[in-house]
Amino acid sequence: MPFKFEKLIVWQKALDLATIVDETSKKFPREELYVLASQIKRAADSISLNIAEGSTGQLNAEFKRFLGIALRSDIEVVGCIYLAKRRNIINEEDFNKIYKSCEEILVMINALRNSLG
């Protein structure tokens, strides 16, 4: 693995989340395709992309900044699933699966940020 981020478990978990979100968003109704489905997919993708971008060739302070963006994207995914649940777009099982994944990623990002000093 030539890139530093590929070894990060939090990055791997973020990829898993993006896959789950992508699969779940395919169940969204057509009228949500360019609204909530698009928003949640962009937010989920942003988590792994910011971890990757910030990890390589950056000072710790810069990496922490990118991790902060990834953290906010993770929280945005949670906001999106609450909207989807309220609109009866996702079921309880999909909600819980995404929520738990976001919660795990949040803890891991915070731990990584704290380890950077």
Image: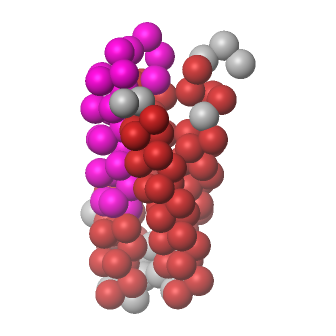
Residue 3 vertical placement versus 31 (above, below): above
Above or below 45: residue 2: above
Q: Is residue 52 placed above or below 16 in the rendered structure? A: above
Q: Quadrant of residue 83?
A: bottom left
The N terminus lies in quadrant: top right
Residue 104 relative to residue 50: left or right: right
Magenta stretch secondary structure, dominant: helix
Is 93 or 1 nearer to us in this picture? 1
Image vertical order of residue 75 relative to residue 96, above or below: above
Residue 75 on image: x %, y %: 33, 60
Residue 31 rendering spot, x and y as whole percentages: 32, 72
Q: Residue at 32% across / 87% down in the picture?
A: 86
Residue 21 in view, yes or no: no
Question: Is residue 16 found inside the magenta-colored segment of the image?
Answer: no
Identify the residue at horizontal 44%, vertical 56% (top origin).
Answer: 106
Residue at (29% x, 51% y) in the render: 72
- Number of labels in the image equals 0
Q: Quadrant of the C terminus?
A: top left
Residue 42 place in picture, x, y as percent: 37, 48
Q: In which quadrant of the rendered view does residue 67 lie?
A: top left
Q: Is residue 76 magenta?
A: yes
User: What sort of colour scheme is used for the picture?
Assistant: secondary structure
Q: Which residues are magenta?
A: 55-77
Q: Is residue 17 visible?
A: yes
Image coords of residue 5 (percent x, y)? 56, 27
Q: Which image quadrant for residue 89?
A: bottom left
Considering every residue shown, the one lying at the far right of the view is 1
